[in-house]
Image (cartoon, rainbow, N blue to C red):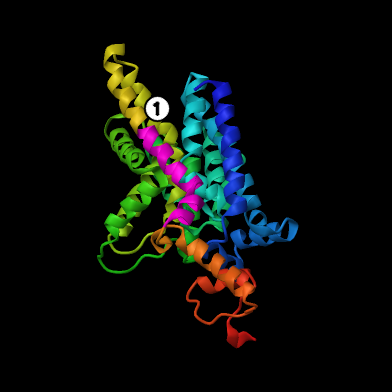
Amino acid sequence: MKKQHFFYVLALYVIAVFYLAISTPISPHEAKIFFTSNDVVSTLMHWGDSLIGGFLGLRIFFMLFGLLSLGFFYKLSRRYFERPKDAYLATAIFMVLPGILTGFTLANISIIVLPVVLLFVLLYEKKIYWPLPFLMLILFFIHEASILFFIAMLWYAIMEKDKRLGIAAFAFLIAFITLAKGIEIGGRPSGHFIEIFGLYAAVFSPLLFLYFFYTMYRILLREKKTLLWYISFTALAFSLILSVRQRVSITDFAPYVMVSVVLMLDVLNNSMRVRLPIFQKYYRRGFYLVIGILLLSTATIVFHKASYMLLDQPKKHFANKIYEPYFLAKELKKENSPCYNDARGRERYQLRYYGILLCRNF
């Protein structure tokens, strides 16, 4: 991808992100965090709400973290590819991932963790070691699932004989165990194993997730294993293992698997460019098919509001839990009804954000 084409795509992308952030009502997850949590996500949401207000205020800091992630990802891509156009292409694919686009526009922990992980890998590969303990400390405090990151660091350090990294990663793992932090493990064998594949397909798009899975497997067997691979493979392996017994939260794993886009494009280039041009066409066709499905998935998110409004049965739409409380609140306000008793679960917090409380609170 040429530089000028990349910046055209980036401009359209930023417009789409602002449109989604401004026009998408508060989600059930955001509403619950906003009213019940004191973590970093809730704090940033309240800061944005006090500074700007509205849906954009809730999400403005997360959009900034997203833009920061794009910059770090491009810098990291330049270390993998000799040609700048490959780095631009990798960054363009990365930013249109459904998981990244959603992370840009909805308040969530993943988009805060992502730039920290990317910066850590970038600095490590540049052999700038002094900031790394501070980044590890940030991950330790803001994300309980960062135990996966430290497991990956320890594994990498053992395999590459990096004593300093190994000692640091081991110390943080001990801290996780001592403080009883980390991912909750429990349950009994159930059907969530298939569910995790659906979640990954939603984060990557279906065909791109298959290629991600293939890339992780291929590098495991025959390619050079980098720090990025250890991070992504560890997150993938743990998510699949845990999903056998319990429902897995994709936000715990997404920041560590989505950085693998650079690895996927690197494997594709290594497979395609060693072949004669006549044999490269099959790889190019497969690439165009995967990117076509990816763009279709991204377009589904960008134009989700239009598709919701056009449906005869909007309750079947994937965004119904976002829009139904929003339109319900508007109807209640038209009827001068300041309260509502039939809300359940997180819907109560969404209605509370719109100024509609339970009637018993009046």
Instruction: Report the residue at 65% width, 78% height from top.
Output: 336
Residue 36 in view in this figure: no
Q: Residues within 10 Å of mark 1 (few under 14, many from 20)?
A: some
Whether residue 189 appears in magenta in the rendering, the answer is: no
Residue 16: quarter of image: top right
The residue lying toward the viewer, choosing from 201 and 214, is 201
Which is more toward the observer, 26 or 123?
A: 26
Residue 8 visible? yes
Q: Nearer the viewer, residue 86 or 332?
A: 332
- Image coords of residue 266 (percent x, y): 40, 27
Q: Is residue 292 magenta?
A: yes
Q: Which residue does the image show at 41% across and 43% down from the upper left?
A: 297
Name the quadrant containing residue 64: top right
What span is colored magenta in the figure? 290-311
Residue 227 image point, x, y percent: 44, 37
Residue positioned 31% across, 58% down in the render = 243
On the image, the x and y values in percent for residue 188 come to 27, 68
Q: Amino acid at mark 1?
A: Asp
Residue 351's quadrant in the figure? bottom right
Q: Main secondary structure of the magenta part?
A: helix
Name the residue beneath numbered marker 1. 266
The relative height of residue 235 versus residue 247 in the rendered view (above or below) is: above
- The x and y percentages for residue 251 are 46, 55
Residue ID at (26%, 34%) = 221
Q: Nearer the viewer, residue 25 or 77?
A: 25
Q: Is residue 3 above or below residue 96?
A: above
Location of the C terminus (image quadrant): bottom right
Left or right placement of residue 70 versus residue 232 in this view = right
Number of dots carrying numbers? 1
**Which residue lies most toward the right here?**
51
